Image (cartoon, rainbow, N blue to C red):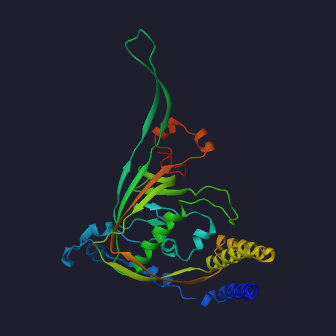
Amino acid sequence: MGLFNSVQGVNQTIGAASSVFGAISAANSAINTISETAGSFADLGATDNLRSIGLPTAGEAVGDIMSAVATFGGGDAPSNDWRVRLSLPKWPSFRKSPVLKPLTEAGGCIFPYTPAITITQSTNYNSTSPVHNNYAFNAFKNSDPGSISIVAPMYCEDSAQALYWIAMLHYLRSTSKMFSGNDPKAGNPPPIVNLNAYGNFVFKNVPVVITGFTVALEKDCDYIGCNVVGSAASAIAGVADNLGGLADTFGLDIISDLSGTIGQVAGLLGAFGIGGSTSGGVTHVPTKSTFTVTLKPSYSRQTVRKFSLDQFVTGGYMSGSTGFV
């Protein structure tokens, strides 16, 4: 009787896998809340932004100041866009993720409210102190571009802004993890992204890795609920994990093989943004929070070998793609 129940449970799990695969074929008809609301970010005006930080409606900016109003939208960064922006990795799963759709629509992870940025840089020397000498000799070792710290406030008034908040959190979590498991690029480190902010002579296409981030879910603010969509490929991967657990429990090799195959298919679907979307349920986000992100400039050996101080001093790198700081 116990073996019969076990086999029956396996059949139910396989049936669940079939239903998830069926969801893929119906992806075009799935509910996509993000795609319906992401466009509203580009239309945020001064009133919404001022209300988000508690200023009265009569305090809107006027005249030329209106051109400096922060927005969520914007697409690819134009030459005169000075907002703080982290690019999306070029790997298809980042570009096609339904959870990251608000960032895709905005043209990257844009901090909609002006953040505080701290730049650190150091030059390192090895000190040699010979005996019977009043002074040490300093030998140059290297120059370190240091870390870049971004402290960004975030205010949410409606479900559209809440979805953007969720996308930012998911983006920071995703870019802090390596490729592993069933990933086609398993073994590769977390992706490198580009930082742009305040024009060519501040941050222009600076390649950075995210070394850490924090966001506090405070108890003294309201929370907004919003409907979020997830990836059907992730649901398939969840079914594969359940099958793998059954295989380990009952020692059934055929189930283990099936689990591995489904997991590989799910990995490929997710990597190339295939598999449609499925409901992720309601998520609640704070109306007021602060993201603190730490970045580290990261350059390839080939790029560093071609570095010229003369070219750097004269501003030769400021409008290119090398991103030297």
Whole-percent x, y for residue 177 in the image: 57, 60
Residue 168 horizontal side relative to residue 64, left or right:
right
Quadrant housing residue 182: bottom right
Q: State whether residue 262 appears in this view.
A: no
**Front residue (pair 165, 103):** 165
Residue depicted at x 46% and y 79%: 38
Q: State whether residue 251 appears in this view.
A: yes
Residue 29 horizontal side relative to residue 39, left or right:
right
Total labels drawn: 0
Residue 278 horizontal side relative to residue 157, left or right:
right
Residue 201 horizontal side relative to residue 26, left or right:
left
Q: Split into 4 quadrants, where in the image is the N terminus?
A: bottom right
Whole-percent x, y for residue 85 in the image: 45, 62
The residue positioned farthest toward the front in the image shown: 1
The residue positioned farthest toward the right in the image shown: 254
Whole-percent x, y for residue 27 in the image: 63, 86
Residue depicted at x 60% and y 64%: 90
Residue depicted at x 54% and y 52%: 321
Q: Vertically, is 131 above or below 121?
A: above
**Front residue (pair 36, 314):** 36
